[in-house]
Amino acid sequence: MQSKLCECGHSNPYGTSLCQACGKPLDNEVEVLSSMRYEGSARRSQTYKSTIVDRVWNFFSSVKVGVWLIVTILVAAAIGTIFPQEMFIPPNVDPASHYESEYGTLGFIYYLLGFHNLYGSWWFIILLGMLGLSIIIASLDRGIPLYKALKTQRVTRHDQFMKNQRLLSVSHDVEMEEIKYSLETLRYKVREEEGNLFAEKGRFSRWGAYVNHVGLIIFLTGAMLRFFPGMYVDEILWVREGEKASIPGTKSDEGQFYLENNDFILEMYDKNDKKFNSALSSVDGEVAKNYQSNVTLYKTEPAHTIGEEPKLLKVKDGVIRVNEPFKFDSFALYQTDFKLNEFYKMSFKLEEKSTGKFFGDLTVDLHEPETEYDLGNGYRVEILDYYPNFVLNEHNQPATVNNLPDNPAFVFAMYSPSTPKGEKAFVGIQKNIESGDNQFKMSFAGIETKDLTALTVRKDHTLWIIALGGIIFMIGVTQGLYWNYRRIWIKQNEDGIWAAAHTNKNWYGLKKDLEFLSDKTNLTPLEDKEIDSIK
Amino acid sequence: MSELSSTLLYSAFIIYLFSTLFFAMSISDKKQSKAAYTKRWGRIGFISACAGFLFQLGYFITRWIASGHAPVSNLFEFTTFFGMMMVLAFIILYIIYRTNGLGVFAMPVAVLVISYASMFPREISPLIPALQSDWLKIHVTTAALGEGILAISFVSGLIYLIRTVDQSVSTKKTKWLEIILYSLLSVVGFIVVSLAFKGTGYETSFEMMNENNQPTKIVYEMPALAGPANGKQLDEGFGPLFSTPSWMNGVDASIKLNTFIWSLVAGLIIYGLLRLILRKRISAALQSKVNNMNPELLDEISYRAVAIGFPIFTLGALIFAMIWAQQAWSRFWGWDPKEVWALITFLFYAAYLHLRLSRGWHGEKSAWLCVLGFWIITFNLIAVNLVLVGLHSYA
Ligand code: HEM
């Protein structure tokens, strides 16, 4: 495709509508003002329209399409809030029936359409991808030619270009030096050429849109990187008071981190506190003031052989509260949940039923019970079966729900010199089942409890990318929306001095500048061809 | 200290009312004596808006001292603050454009927001651990400022529509304008019925099952039009006419719905009375008051408010919110309804900017969009708390 030579001598790429140097329309049909948005530069989307690639390019570079994408995502996002998303419904229910039973037929349809998991659905992700693509293509299509055009623009503009501007006037007897001085007091950058002036201010704001779009793209990329392995760790860690646990997700060549829970603290607001008295008296129950875990971080010694108990080296002490995560390495631990008074150890005494005499006692660690407890003098107790969270299953057999000792129950075998074959007893909380002719029984002697803390273990290598995207976006919007690009051309012609002005937005502000200019100099006030002046 | 704080808020409220009045004086006059008269009342209106703002700032600071935390932690405090930010936004835009007409509409809307706020429990309440964060304060205040500025774009767009929509015939546009004005009047209705029933001390109570299937007693302070789902009335009070759908979450859902219906009814009565008195559409009656205003300037102001408000809103409602969420919940985004509606607001104004800057949607189209945008903001402030409860529900 051939380039177009303007009469001013500038060679313009194919597809240009206004000469990039002097602004002369290169075609009779060109409307100057509407071409000013992108300086009449050669945009790919306006120039090439035949191949498939062109069509895809043109589709995504259209602002109409862009707005449709934004609106579609907006509507989809709103639909996702009509009923709770799957992640907010109770974890132990079946979503298929939950939506119907809670929200009726509409809920059922909602579930059928997959709206219960809308934000993770393939089509929502594709919409986001298309939005990203559209932002990239639209920006490249406009940004690059715009950049070139603003760089090559000359001071002296073609008459046609001046005449078609929205703000225009012709004056006589004007001192160019005066105008230049006034423009400079308005902090315009003024250039001079052959006695003509070109003043511009805030050109950088013209890049605002492109900067903010770059920020958005970086942000979206960061959000997508989450799905790559190694970038993101999200685990939950329960630790009992006084115990150490290995922190999931933190194993590396240098070793593995362990965390000790020294103390879990739950504080409530004092109902008698004068400050909050009236608010607290109107709620039932108490209002939490603080959830806190005091912890110590350890790391295994680097050179430890497999199979050996790892040796732990203390790294540091710390405090974890809601809103105050504990950070180490590239990880952070967040106070997420807790459990107070979990059963920890249960104590029993071996009792002779007829005499009520005790023959030693034992304490069972409910997480790691021993199989046998020797009480000396020929007395001992075996644990034949252990149900940490006891229930009777559908066959009426003893079973356990899970490994948490919420309702511990045991089958004990008790041995004594007089009962060397052993006697069996089933013992749980408030339960003691045994054959009637047992001589011995296990009598309950006490229980110890402990608090647990639950911490979210998080590593997120995408955070800095997201943050960077956010910062660039904010810079871009501020730059583009709080500033604007104003240009004023002053040209000496035979019939007087022509003045024309243009801005990409905020004509109100530009007009104030021009009023100042015609107040201070002899310049004829510029007239607005579009509106009779805002005021 | 907390008494001083209430007094300051009350004073601010009264001053705002006067400011509205002064601004109204500045435009009510006919053409002749225009210049000096308008200028004087406009200046007095503006000065009183600033004075009211300072009083409210005083309320804010003293309440902060009294409670020990930034007073933006419950619905009363947040909504009051939102009203204050609207006034601030108005002051900023007035300094740029000096249009008295804007004050006539912006100040009463702010007054309405603050009266609405004061219908919520006003006690100083303690902060639960999740809310004890500096980022939360920064997030809430910045978001409210952004929303306040965007609210001015609504006010200006609304005046634009009142000024330009043809009132000689009844069209879809005139109907929508009436609906908008009616919704504003429903807020007045809400305040009137709340005060009225509080004044008479009306109460009726129900027993219902809460989320954990425990029987709970709930107390209505207005006659029950909408009863609780599966509730049993415990006294001989009026109603209920029907029961609240069970999918509306929370024990208080039915009380909120009931109040909402009362507000709509009261709004309708006020609207009807006004129509009877004015003998024409309210927007038609208002039109004659704003005839002197320049539509291009109104259009410019409403766009400018979006241009200024959008970055602040994004910073406050999305970016600072994400920083807080990262700290409190270990993830910066969780698709919680309140978050999603902030995102929707963001996307909506992004669409507005593209339509305006790239597709030339000026004037009327742009004004309707500004109205819709404000609807989204208030929906997020009110309805999301009412129906779609999430992490952020304060109550
Ligand atoms: C949520 C997504 C988006 C956001 C937040 C966004 C934000 C913005 C903002 C704030 C502006 C005005 C900046 C200024 O004038 O200084 C702008 C301009 C623009 N945007 Fe977007 N945008 C988004 C998506 C898109 C998409 C999908 C397209 C694709 C067509 C697009 C194309 C444009 C164009 C062509 C401009 C005008 C550029 C110019 O004036 O040179 N944007 N965008």
Image (cartoon, rainbow, N blue to C red):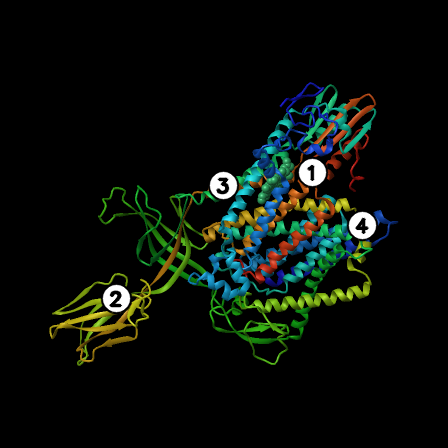
Q: Which residue is mark 1?
A: A505
Cβ atoms under marks 4 and 3 closer than 8 Å: no
Label 2 and label 3: CA atoms lie apart by 51 Å
**Which of the numbered marks, if any, corresponds to residue A221?**
3
Subunit under mark 3: A
4 vs 1, front mark: 1
- Give the chain of mark 4: B
Q: Residue at the location (20% across, 80% down)?
A: A436
| Residue in the picture at 78% in, 38% down | A530
CA gap, disc 2 to disc 1? 77 Å
- Mark drawn on residue A386: 2
Q: Residues within 10 Å of mark 1 (few under 14, many from 20)?
A: some
Residue nearer the viewer, B169 or A459: B169
Q: From the viewer's perspective, is residue A267 above or below residue A420?
A: above
| Amino acid type, mark 4 | Arg
- Where disc 2 sits, the SS reads strand
Mark number displayed over residue A268: none
Check disc 3 and report its element: helix, strand or loop: helix
Circle 4 sits in a helix, a strand or a loop, which is it?
A: helix
Where A395 sits versus A182, above or below? below
**Chain to which mark 2 belongs:** A
Disc 4 and disc 2 on one polypeptide chain: no
Residue B40's mark?
4
- Please state, as top left, top right, bottom left or bottom right, where the N terminus of chain B lies in the image: bottom right
Quadrant for ligand 1 reads top right
| Protein chain holding label 1 | A
**Which percent across, then down, holds residue A339?**
38, 62
| Circle nearer the N terminus (1, 3) | 3
Q: Quadrant of the C terminus of chain B?
A: bottom right
